[in-house]
Amino acid sequence: MQLFFSPTQLDHDPKKEISDGKLVDAVEVPKRAEMIFDALMKLPQIEHKPQQDFGLAPIAQVHDRAYIDFLAAFGALWAEAGRSGEGFPFVWPGRDFRTDRVPNHLDGKLGHYSFDAGTPLTDKTFGAAYASAQSALNGASALLQGDQASFALCRPPGHHAGKDYYGGYCFFNNAAIAAQYFRDQGAQRVSIFDVDYHHGNGTQSIFYDRADVQFLSVHADPMDEYPYFLGHADEKGVGQGHGHNFNYPLPLGTTADALMAAIEAGLAEINSFAPDYLVISLGVDFFEGDPISQFKLTYADMPAIGTLLKTANVPTLFVMEGGYAVDDLGRNVAALIDGFLAG
Ligand code: OKP
Ligand code: ZN
């Protein structure tokens, strides 16, 4: 199994985030990727090769140009405004505000292109997010060339990012970019199964009106957990996309049995859809020790999740999303992938 990761992804190195009314130490840190990389490299089946650069075009197949340009320009705009620290939005268009005009002012732009205040933006974010998306594209390319499985160690993660907004530590939607790339390279149908603890609101939104990309997500019930405003079971898709979106919200405190039952339900839908490729948005923040999450899976539960995902029996790209128990992160991911490879 080829593993894709570039050190440029470590350049996004935020110091602080806003949480519980305070500036606290950032949770989505470079060390996360280093821990996962080191642990995966210990698996004998994993090989790490140099990355190809697919350019901006496949990113622009998913994200609006103006949004991409804003992220690219952010560092200069922030410096020009004479600001120090990291970029945080604090004003958004409320329900009946206008969103058809992008404000000139930096604070207006920040609000226009984001949906939460928990995601620090730095002058290095664009480069790291670009490199993270390239890892996903390399992983997709490996499957297009005939590999049965590949692992894109994406970080920053992607599944909360929509076509023209960031949030939830996510800037470019790596899973969506990979899925769209499969389509653009001739695949007829692609499934994205999001098994992060949080709902993949960005990925859902990007494909909500489409019949060619099926989206499924198991996650903590948005009534009780971030991102709060999307991820309910009655969100089925619109237009051509109706019947191609599947949400499996689960209660806080969920253990392996219930999570695996929901994954099995999702796998049955994937089986009927018969995709050419499967993208797994993988977060291991369902781990009991995760500092920001409230599911109760143990380290010992990880291999069975991987083995279960293998039963999809479709060429599979893993795209890394969340997981914040930094000391346990590597071995949790490696145990899950070990279970997948053994399955
Ligand atoms: C990203 B991913 C906790 C704030 C949590 C956002 C969580 C984003 C999770 N006080 N903020 O899906 O793992
Ligand atoms: Zn998550």
Image (tube, rainbow, N blue to C red):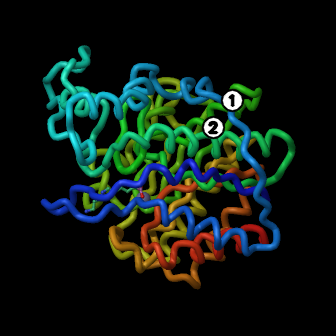
Q: Secondary structure at mark 1?
A: helix
Number of the label disc, if any, that sits on residue 183: 1
Q: Nearer the viewer, residue 227 or 105?
A: 105
Q: Residue at x 47, y 46 (%)?
A: 159
Q: Secondary structure at mark 2?
A: helix
Disc 2 marks which amino acid? Ala
Where ligand 1 lies, by image quadrant? bottom left
In the picture of the structure, the residue carrying the numbered disc 2 is 179
Q: Nearer the viewer, residue 261 or 23?
A: 23
Q: Residue at x 41, y 52 (%)?
A: 199
117 sits to left or right of 287: left
Disc 1 marks which amino acid? Arg
Q: Residues within 10 Å of mark 1 (few under 14, many from 20)?
A: some
317 sits to left or right of 236: right
Residue 79 percent coordinates (x, y): 28, 33
266 sits to left or right of 316: left
